[in-house]
């Protein structure tokens, strides 16, 4: 299980610069694709590789590309979604900071495959320091003939622009991202029409995550079928996991899909076990939006099989006893972590980040946060727990964009698996005050 | 022509029609309520989620249901689509939830609100809402502000339907107000107080489904159900001049555009007609305006309010009220 694809050369000194990157085999895929392959062949390779969107939904990339409206005479756009704002997820930042050329390489090939001549990287406002890194890398690539007019002497031309956002989580939703890129308020659009038909400036657009696009380069070099040999079942290839929380070695790890969760948490090559040799209590395996799972269900499925790091295995048992791989923000809680406090923290985040366009999300996220605040600060009632379940159910599925679901799932799953802890908070407000050391005292309530 | 079935009633509609428009062609009980959609404002809709319906069959080619409820105002119909509105318990439940969300921060100050009696939110909560509320949370509060010399903004009552934003974008020269901030603290506002100043700004009042934008020349003058709505017209150089004049005795208390059965204006009118012409001599009165909706406005003067059973699942509840 040592297969590394994206981060294979991460330790080479100076890999951020063009020269070192080129020496380690960089941009070979661009030469191969542009000189030896047609755009359709690139598409086929990506489809064969079984690559799935790494931004959270896990939608097959080849299929997504095939939806792009190619019949139109309007320009087409490729947008790289670098608005990584999910709490617990920091893999794209790491990738862009250390391997900017890997992303650019992937962008060139993907743009070539999609027949795109203008490509945008929409980057989160807080990642301002990465804008310089990316722009420098784009200039280097252009100076070496990999970008701009007539790339490598072929007829193909491509421009890449880096566009920093203003730091809104909602702009990671693809249609809100396109609105923001057009210079408007970042409100998600009503779908249909989907971006594949009417995206940026009303033209057909593909929006892909940084990690997805970065994987396209290695796929072209090794071939789609070879890439599909990594991983397990329909979860092919490798995935970047950003591990954080109460573990010994937080950081970004590239794992081959199919690694058992237990190995990932306790393996010396990965998280290295729980900090202070405490017990594992719960894990949010895919960024804050996905359902939390208690330790027993995290390590093995309800059927008793070992839980693996794949899209399918993590989703086994649906939401009753399963969760999602999501964006790979792996948040680990030890025995002392307070689930109620964590849930309140997440609810606070979603309330702050809701765009306020549609009523269930705008009102529901605020309501959940207020109720959770009450419970966490010793003013809750037992009926509040059922109220939370009801609110989350009413938000889920009734909103314009997935932010509503993302806000509802953590609350619903925390109550599903840790109801006793919520009840304890209601019944023993004084005791909870002592458990949550460092927390806001009850006397500080408004 | 596409064939679509809504609540077991089939209808043929043209390509590009939305589910809501198709339902309005059928009319009556199958029409989902809409708080933010406004057929005359391009781009409106999809936000309030009160018009959610269940698509039991996506099309003749693909008979699978759509897993989530869809906003009927923004979903185009497909041939062979089967839609459930009130026949789906899921839709009824979801709509109840949406009403609850919309009322969560609404001040419920209907007794002192000028919109009472012609308020879409009142109708919606009466028709679809829950009988009890259990919120103990504090409601968000904003001070009432003047956004123009003729318009008062009560942000507390706003449900953020964006209709006034689209109206200002599409029927006035320049929009000077918009949605500020985000999430549950977002608000309608102008950068500079009193900034809304153009000849068609008054239509923002008419498109507002609640009492967030009210006519300052009519504030606290009378309850709408004490007034007699009359169709009137004048020769206006700026607009069509076709309005509804609201009379109390012989006096004109206020002038609005003519609204159809879905609360939408037939014609946008100019501010001169709306705010300046309050003398009966300015207008040629055509006759009483029939307010077709289940409105209390119709109760006093022209049509006796009948027992309405507009909404199937709670018809019993409504009849008890009368």
Image: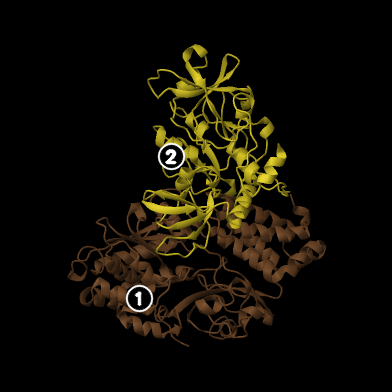
- Describe the element under mark 1 as helix, strand or loop: helix
In the rendered view, tell whether residue A272 sits above or below residue A324: below
In the image: residue A248, left or right of residue A118: right
The residue that appears at 46% across and 68% down in the rendered structure is A55
Does the rendering let one see residue A341?
yes
Q: Disc 1 is attached to a residue of which chain?
A: A
Measured as percent of width and height from the top left, residue A72 is found at: 26, 57
Query: Crowdedness of circle 2 by 10 Å Cα count: few (<14), some, many (20+)?
Result: some
The answer to which of A386 and A120 lies nearer the viewer is A386
In space, the residues marked 1 and 2 are separated at their CA atoms by 42 Å
In the rendered view, tell whether residue A380 sits above or below residue B51: below
Determine the colour of chain B.
yellow
Does the rendering let one see residue B192?
no
Q: Disc 2 is attached to a residue of which chain?
A: B
Measured as percent of width and height from the top left, residue A221 is found at: 31, 80
Measured as percent of width and height from the top left, residue B40 is found at: 43, 38
The brown-tinted chain is A
In the rendered view, tell whether residue B17 sits above or below residue B41: below
The answer to which of B258 and A202 lies nearer the viewer is B258
Q: Which of the two discs, 1 and 2, sits closer to the camera?
A: 2
The residue that label 2 is drawn on is B41
The residue that appears at 58% across and 37% down in the rendered structure is B210
Measured as percent of width and height from the top left, residue B96 is found at: 63, 50
The answer to which image quadrant residue A214 occupies is bottom left
The residue that label 1 is drawn on is A47
Mark carried by residue A141: none
- Describe the element under mark 2 as helix, strand or loop: loop
């Amino acid at each position: 299980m040592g297969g590394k694809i994206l981060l294979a050369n991460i330790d080479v000194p100076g890999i951020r610069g063009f020269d070192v990157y080129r020496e380690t085999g960089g941009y070979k895929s661009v030469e191969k694709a542009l000189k030896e392959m047609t755009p359709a062949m690139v598409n086929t390779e990506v489809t064969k590789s079984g690559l799935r969107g790494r931004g959270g939904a896990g939608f097959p990339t080849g299929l997504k590309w095939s939806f792009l409206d190619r019949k139109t005479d309007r320009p087409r756009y490729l947008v790289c979604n670098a608005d990584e704002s999910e709490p617990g997820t920091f893999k794209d930042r790491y990738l862009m900071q250390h391997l900017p050329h890997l992303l650019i390489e992937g962008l060139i090939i993907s743009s070539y495959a999609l027949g795109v001549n203008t490509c945008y990287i929409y980057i989160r406002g807080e990642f301002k320091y990465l804008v310089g890194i990316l722009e420098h890398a784009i200039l280097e690539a252009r100076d070496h003939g990999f970008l701009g007019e007539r790339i490598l002497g072929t007829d193909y031309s491509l421009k890449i622009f880096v566009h920093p956002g203003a730091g809104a989580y909602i702009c990671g939703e693809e249609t809100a991202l396109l609105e923001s890129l057009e210079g408007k308020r970042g409100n998600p659009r009503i779908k249909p029409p989907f971006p594949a038909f009417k995206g940026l400036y009303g033209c057909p657009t593909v929006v892909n995550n940084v990690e997805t696009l970065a994987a396209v380069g290695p796929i072209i070099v090794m071939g789609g079928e070879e890439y599909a040999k990594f991983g397990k079942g329909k979860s092919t290839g490798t995935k970047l996991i950003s591990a954080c929380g109460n573990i010994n070695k937080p950081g970004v790890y590239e794992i081959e899909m199919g690694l058992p969760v237990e190995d990932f948490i306790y393996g010396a090559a990965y998280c290295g076990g729980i900090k202070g040799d405490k017990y594992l209590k719960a894990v949010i395996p895919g960024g804050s939006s996905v359902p939390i799972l208690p330790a027993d269900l995290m390590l093995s499925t309800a059927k008793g099989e070992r839980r693996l790091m794949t899209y399918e295995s993590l989703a086994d048992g649906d939401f009753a006893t399963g969760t999602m791989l999501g964006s790979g923000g792996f948040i680990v809680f030890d025995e002392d972590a307070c689930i109620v406090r964590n849930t309140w923290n997440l609810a606070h985040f979603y309330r702050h980040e809701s765009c306020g366009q549609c009523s269930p999300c705008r009102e529901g996220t605020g309501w959940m946060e207020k109720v959770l605040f009450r419970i966490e600060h010793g003013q809750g009632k037992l009926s509040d727990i059922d109220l939370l379940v009801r609110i989350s159910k009413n938000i889920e599925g009734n909103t314009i964009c997935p932010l509503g679901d993302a806000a509802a799932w953590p609350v619903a799953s925390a109550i599903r698996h840790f109801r006793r802890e919520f009840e304890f908070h209601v019944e023993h407000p004084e005791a909870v005050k002592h458990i949550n050391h460092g927390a806001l005292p009850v006397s500080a309530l408004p | 022509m596409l064939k679509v079935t809504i609540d077991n009633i089939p209808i043929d509609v043209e390509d590009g029609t939305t589910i809501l428009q198709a339902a309005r062609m059928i009319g009556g009980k199958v029409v989902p309520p809409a708080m933010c959609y406004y057929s005359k404002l391009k781009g409106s809709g999809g936000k309030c989620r009160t018009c959610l319906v269940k698509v039991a069959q996506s099309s003749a080619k693909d008979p699978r249901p759509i897993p989530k409820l869809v906003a009927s105002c923004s979903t185009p119909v497909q041939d062979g689509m089967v839609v459930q509105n009130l026949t789906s318990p899921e839709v009824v439940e979801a709509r109840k939830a949406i009403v609850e969300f919309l009322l969560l921060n609404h001040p419920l100050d209907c007794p002192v609100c000028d919109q009472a009696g012609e308020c879409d939110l009142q109708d919606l909560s009466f028709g679809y809402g829950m009988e009890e509320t259990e919120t103990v949370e504090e409601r968000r509060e904003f001070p009432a502000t003047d956004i123009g010399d003729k318009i008062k903004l009560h942000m507390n009552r706003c449900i953020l339907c964006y209709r006034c934003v689209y109206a200002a974008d599409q029927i006035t020269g320049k929009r000077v107000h918009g949605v500020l901030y985000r999430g549950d603290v977002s608000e309608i506002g102008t950068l500079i107080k009193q900034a809304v100043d153009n000849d068609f700004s008054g239509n923002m009042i008419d498109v507002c489904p609640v009492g967030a934008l009210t006519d300052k020349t009519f504030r606290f003058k009378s309850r709408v159900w004490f007034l007699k709505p009359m169709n009137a017209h004048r020769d206006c150089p700026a607009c069509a001049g076709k309005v509804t004049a609201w009379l109390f005795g012989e006096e004109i208390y206020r002038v609005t555009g003519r609204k159809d059965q879905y609360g939408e204006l037939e014609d946008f009118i100019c501010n001169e007609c709306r705010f300046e012409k309050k003398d009966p001599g300015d207008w040629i009165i055509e006759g009483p305006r029939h307010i077709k909706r289940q409105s209390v406005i119709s109760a006093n003067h022209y049509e006796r309010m009948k027992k309405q059973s507009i909404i199937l699942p709670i018809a019993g509840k409504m009849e008890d009220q009368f």
